[in-house]
Structures are given as C-alpha cells and as structure tokens.
Amino acid sequence: MSLLNINNLSVILETNKGPARAVRNLSFRLEKGETLGIVGESGCGKSMAALALMGLLPERSKTEGQIKLDGQNLLEKDDQEMCQIRGNRLAMIFQEPMTSLNPVHTVGNQIMEPLRLHRNMSESDAKVETLRLLDRVGIPNPQARFDNYPHQLSGGQRQRVMIAIALSCQPDVLIADEPTTALDVTIQDQILDLIQTLVREEGMSLILISHDLGVISENTDNILVMYGGAAVETGKTEQIFDELIHPYTQGLFAAMPKLGRAKNRRLVTIPGTVPDLISMPMGCTFTDRCPLATEVCQNTPPPVVEVKSKHFVACHHLDEARDRKTEELFS
C-alpha cells in the first residue's frame, strides 16, 4: 500500500459566475521516501491540489474522489480529526512566509506551537527543541532569533523558519509549494539543498510544487505535469525530460532559456492563456492552445495511455506529438 494515494480527486470552487473545477480527476501515488514534482503554469491547479491534501480549501468548496494516507480517506475526516493530521503527519511549506507567519507572535512561539499541540511537550522541552530546529535549518544565533518577530528576519530566514515549523513533528509527507519564489537565486539554492537534505535524513516523502523545470529536474524522482486542473503527463523525472511527449510538456520545455541560444533568437512561447476554470472544454483542457488539437480533443476527454513503464500521457494524438520536435510544435 502506498503512503499517499490520490484517486480521481476533483475540487470545485463556488464563484459568482458559477462552479469552477480547479482540480479535475487527479490521481497519483507517493511512496515512503519518494519525491514528486508537480509542475505547470500559474492557475493550472497545483496549489489547489496541495490545499486539498492539507484540508485547507476555501469555504464553500467541494471535493470529490479520495485522498488516502496509509489507507485512511482524509476527505472523510472532520475538522478535529484533520487538526490531528495537519502539521503532524502532513506538513506544508507555503509560498510566501511573510503572509503565512503570524506577525504578532515571535518565531520561537510559532515553532513551539505544533510541538506542544502534537507532541505534548512541556514549554521548556518545546523551547529546547525549537532552538535545535532553528539551528538545524541554518538560522544563526538561534537563542537571539527565538524572540524575533517575522518582520525582523530576512526573506531567506523567514523561509527557514517555515521549514522548521513544517519539520517540527517529523511528518510523513512534506509539501513545499513554490518554496523559493520570493528569494534570490543564491538563497533559492540554499533552501532547496536544505529541504533535500532534511527529507533524506528524516526519511520523509516530498511533494515539490514549482513552475521552474530546472528546480523540479534537480530535486525530484517523479514528475506530474498539470494543466487546467488535470494531469496531462506523469512519470519518472528522467523519462519526462528524455521523452517530452504531451504537447503541453513540450511547450513548457521549449520555453526554457538555454545556454548557447543565439542572442537574436526569441524564446519559444505557448500561444494563448490558461483557460477560465468556469468555461473549460469538455475534452482535453489544453485544446484551445494545442497546435495538434482537433474536434475530438474539444469534445472527448483524452485517454490516459502508459507509453512506457510508469510513464502516462493523456493525449488523443500521441503518435503525432512524439514525431514532432519540441520547438517545431510551437514555432
């Protein structure tokens, strides 16, 4: 049995214009100690899927399908039961620590909270463990930083505090949602190296969400490519990078800057924009931007085909997509 098993997960948001299906029939598995990268443009459903796993969806949202942790369906848990799981067995590093940390509490007290709540530590024991965690995530002079408020720390230090909070209860699954977006390149590398080291040493499973393919390629075993709330391609990281089968995956990779590219040569772009969640096509979510799209793509959901061992692609035109070179498809 997989540690985390997601089956046909859908998230429907109630909006003024009607229901919007932000996640559509998403399925994947995560084994203990495994790392999964979820990649796609902004608005493709990555963060919404992560919030569904944590039970932190907006009010009036609806979920369908299953989220099984060690065989238990989390969608059947009430708020009190989820409070025992959230931060304990499932933990999340949010995208922007300045809006995730509480500005009126010291960072020390914010790290101590899950230790006292989930691990039943005394105040003195929780403080000792908090200082150890601050040191573990690379915060200099933990004793002094313990009494600092979030605004007194740099962006990189705030993100390290978020990591310390997420690691405090030694969770089974760590979800990192764009953990380096607000940081400069040097600090990005430090934070990603820290997450990888801690995940490896603690034996945790990792879900890393990013729009940066370079980050995903260097830090995950498997990749799930999302578009329009749906998974369009999944597989081993090396397989995805070597094969590039789905037209959307090809478009993402073609848009990456490459060393040696002529200065006067423009980057490849995917035409159009991410579709409105309320008016998605009935078939493939990528239909309106795909150069291979036909009428069947508009009206019929594409079949999910296992093109190689554990490499799945959802596309009506697999053969044609494989035969085209990536940059030719969007040139």
Image (cartoon, grey):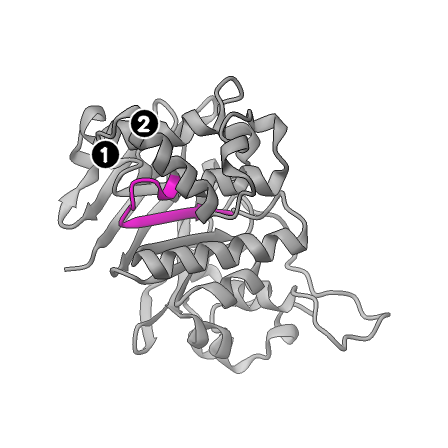
**Residue occupying the point 36% across, 35% down:** 128
Three-letter code for the amino acid on which mark 1 is drawn: Arg
Mark 1 and 2 residues: CB-CB less than 8 Å, in contact?
no
Q: Is residue 4 left or right of residue 180?
A: left
Residue 50 in magenta? no
Residue 135 makes an appearance in the image: yes
Q: Residue 206: x, y in percent?
A: 37, 55
Determine the image quadrant of residue 255.
bottom right
So how many labels did they put on this image?
Answer: 2
**Residue occupying the point 52% across, 62% down:** 248
Nearer the camera: disc 1 or disc 2: 2
Disc 1 packing (10 Å; few <14; some 14–19; many ≥20): few
Residue 229 higher or lower than 78, as above or below: below
In-front residue for pair 276/238: 238
Residue 225 makes an appearance in the image: no
Residue 124 — which label? 2
Residue 196 higher or lower than 311, as above or below: above
Disc 2 packing (10 Å; few <14; some 14–19; many ≥20): few
Three-letter code for the amino acid on which mark 2 is drawn: Ser
In-front residue for pair 225/298: 225
Q: Quadrant of the N terminus?
A: bottom left
Look at mark 1 in the image and give the residue it sits on. Answer: 119
Residue 120 higher or lower than 327, as above or below: above
Magenta residues, as a range?
166-178
